[in-house]
């Protein structure tokens, strides 16, 4: 069974958030408080999967933060430390020190610099790859571009983190068999999708989106829906096939 993994992006105050990628700091603090009071401990994905292999992941939840925004270093890490939690941050390796230019209608958000990525890794945060340029990895991306997005990002971030990068996150959640094969060939142990992919597994891990509207009742409901979905799949009950969304079809929620 796949453990519960939560998907975040930016944590900051905001005026506009058309892509629904931002959670206010006080909301994240409240969400982490709820998880702790529910008896759950937030950890990075690599630690979560290692615990699952030992049968010790029952009270763990994966915390993931996509894109590598600067507010992860300045706001999220202190909140994680306050609650005694870990997390994984998925960094767009070719945009270090840049901005989220893939979200043209949203607020301009700064991304972590190379030094900030190294600093959060030194804090014990798992650094994962999110490609080089935040482009969808499903067709029609060329094979050479696909290999660069997956493999080059891994090597670059490993140099910054001073440790192997074993996790990948598909930009926009977009992936197909070719993208999964490229991730496997690049040497990753696991990869995260968005929502619940058609064929969940170590290289297409399902995640639960968390937004600024998610208080305790909504988090509890999402936890319950994850448990039900995992139970159905364990029992061999097949869901209706779900098409992996393209960036355009993904609507307002980005990865």
Image: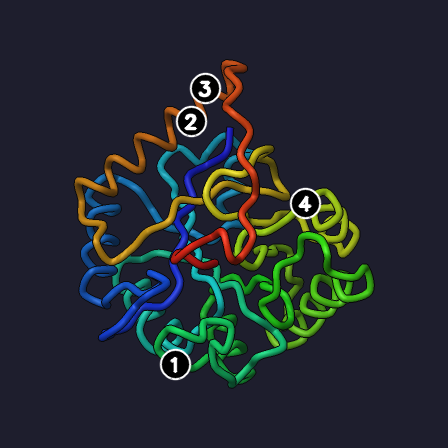
Secondary element at tag 4: loop
Residue 69, x across and y down, in percent: 43, 74
Residue designated by label 4: 176
Question: Looking at the image, is mark 1 or mark 3 nearer the viewer?
Answer: 1
Label 4, label 3: how many angstroms apart (C-alpha)?
23 Å
Residue designated by label 3: 232
Question: Looking at the image, is mark 4 or mark 2 nearer the viewer?
Answer: 4
Disc on the earlier residue, 1 or 4: 1
Residue 175, x across and y down, in percent: 63, 49
Disc on the earlier residue, 2 or 1: 1
Mark 3 Cα within 10 Å, few/some/many (few <14, many 20+)?
few
Secondary element at tag 3: helix
Disc on the earlier residue, 4 or 3: 4
Residue designated by label 1: 108
Q: In front: 137, or 201? A: 137
Residue 6 vs 89, above or below: the answer is above
Residue 157 vs 32, above or below: the answer is below
Residue 7, x across and y down, in percent: 41, 53
Secondary element at tag 2: helix
Instruction: Determine the residue positioned at 60% across, 33% down.
Output: 199
Residue 217, x across and y down, in percent: 17, 40
Disc on the earlier residue, 4 or 2: 4
Residue designated by label 2: 229
Instruction: Determine the residue positioned at 59% across, 42% down.
Output: 204
Q: Are marks 3 and 2 in contact (CB under 8 Å)?
A: yes
Q: In front: 113, or 158? A: 113
Disc on the earlier residue, 1 or 3: 1
């Amino acid at each position: 069974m796949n453990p519960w993994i939560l998907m975040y992006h930016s944590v900051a105050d905001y005026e506009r958030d058309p892509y629904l990628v931002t959670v206010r700091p006080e909301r994240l603090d409240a969400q982490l408080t709820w998880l702790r009071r529910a008896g759950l401990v937030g950890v990075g994905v690599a630690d979560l999967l290692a615990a699952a292999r030992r049968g010790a992941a029952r009270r763990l939840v994966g915390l993931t933060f996509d894109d590598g925004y600067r507010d992860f270093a300045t706001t999220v890490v202190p909140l994680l430390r306050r609650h005694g939690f870990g997390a994984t941050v998925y960094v767009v390796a070719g945009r270090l020190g840049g901005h989220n230019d893939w979200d043209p209608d949203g607020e301009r958000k700064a991304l972590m610099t190379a030094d900030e990525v190294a600093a959060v890794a030194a804090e014990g945060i798992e650094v994962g790859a999110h490609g080089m340029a935040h482009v969808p990895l499903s067709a029609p991306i060329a094979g050479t571009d696909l290999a660069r997005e997956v493999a080059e990002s891994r090597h670059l971030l490993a140099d910054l983190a001073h440790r192997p990068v074993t996790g990948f996150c598909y930009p926009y959640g977009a992936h197909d068999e070719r993208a999964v094969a490229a991730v496997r060939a690049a040497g990753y142990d696991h990869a995260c999708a968005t929502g619940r992919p058609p064929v969940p597994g170590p290289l297409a891990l399902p995640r639960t989106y968390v937004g600024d509207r998610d208080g305790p009742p909504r988090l509890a409901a999402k936890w319950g829906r994850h448990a039900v979905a995992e139970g159905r799949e364990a029992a061999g009950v097949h869901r209706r096939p779900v098409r992996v969304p393209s960036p355009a079809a993904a609507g307002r929620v980005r990865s």
